[in-house]
């Protein structure tokens, strides 16, 4: 029996009423099991599900609050001292001609110490040997 047949079968069944005696028995047992009512029913609160924020902070809320306060102090201190800090990159002067000349002098001295560079002569590439032409290669590629 598939679910559609089951639903059709259940819809065709007449609804039976719960006996009134059961209702009174169930309610009286519930009243006896519950503690005495201190507040009227309208003031009772429905328990809410805990939020994600309170779930994360639950183990040690004072530690989290202290950590948040420290971060706020660090942020405030950073904002208070940020703009007045000297920026080294903005004050860097462009390279002076004397520096370039000193660098060229160092390169000249290094080349004198090392001696002339011996560059190996590269062999010329050998010309490719002619290969036989074949229509077979094109036939294989086309297939």
Image (cartoon, grey):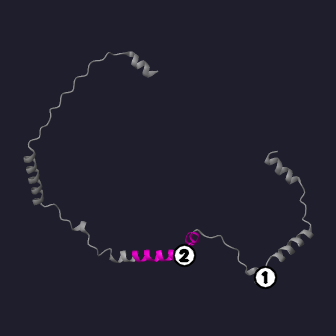
* Magenta-colored segment: predominant secondary structure: helix
State whether residue 103 is above or below residue 123.
Answer: below
Q: Is residue 41 left or right of residue 116?
A: right
State whether residue 94 is above or below residue 76.
Answer: above
Does residue 55 show up magenta in the picture? yes
Asked which secondary structure carries label 1, the reply is loop
Asked which secondary structure carries label 2, the reply is helix
Residue labelled with disc 1: 37
Q: Position of residue 83 (x, y in %)?
A: 31, 74
Identify which residue, 91 or 11, lies in the foreground: 91
Q: Earlier in the sequence, mark 1 or mark 2?
A: 1
Residue labelled with disc 2: 61
**Quarter residue 13 falls in:** bottom right
Q: CA distance from mark 1 to mark 2?
A: 33 Å
Does residue 51 show up magenta in the picture? no
Instruction: Name the residue: 92% across, 70% down.
Output: 21
Identify which residue, 22 or 63, lies in the foreground: 63
> Viewer-nearest of labels 1 and 2?
2
Q: Which residues are magenta?
A: 53-74
Q: Position of residue 28 (x, y in %)?
A: 87, 75
Q: Is residue 3 left or right of residue 56?
A: right
Instruction: Name the residue: 92% across, 66% down.
Output: 19
State whether residue 16 is above or below residue 5.
Answer: below
Q: Is residue 108 left or right of residue 78?
A: left
Instruction: Please tell me how many numbered marks the rendered image carries.
Output: 2
Identify which residue, 17 or 37, lies in the foreground: 37
Instruction: Name the residue: 83% across, 49% down.
Output: 6
Quarter of the figure with the N terminus: top right
Identify which residue, 137 or 75, lies in the foreground: 75
Q: Position of residue 82 (x, y in %)?
A: 33, 74
Instruction: Name the residue: 46% across, 77% down.
Output: 69
Q: Position of residue 87 (x, y in %)?
A: 26, 70
């Amino acid at each position: 029996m598939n679910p559609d047949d089951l639903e059709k079968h259940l819809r065709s069944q007449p609804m039976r009423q719960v006996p009134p005696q059961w209702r009174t028995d169930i309610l009286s047992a519930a009243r006896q099991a519950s503690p005495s009512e201190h507040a009227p029913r309208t003031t009772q609160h429905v328990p809410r599900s805990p939020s994600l924020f309170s779930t994360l902070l639950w183990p040690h809320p004072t530690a989290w609050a202290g950590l948040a306060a420290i971060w706020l102090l660090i942020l405030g201190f950073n904002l208070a001292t940020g703009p007045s800090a000297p920026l080294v990159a903005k004050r860097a002067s462009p390279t002076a001609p004397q520096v370039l000349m000193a660098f060229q002098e160092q390169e000249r001295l290094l080349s004198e110490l090392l001696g002339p560079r011996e560059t190996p002569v590269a062999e010329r590439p050998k010309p490719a040997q002619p290969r036989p032409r074949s229509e077979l290669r094109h036939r294989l590629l086309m297939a």
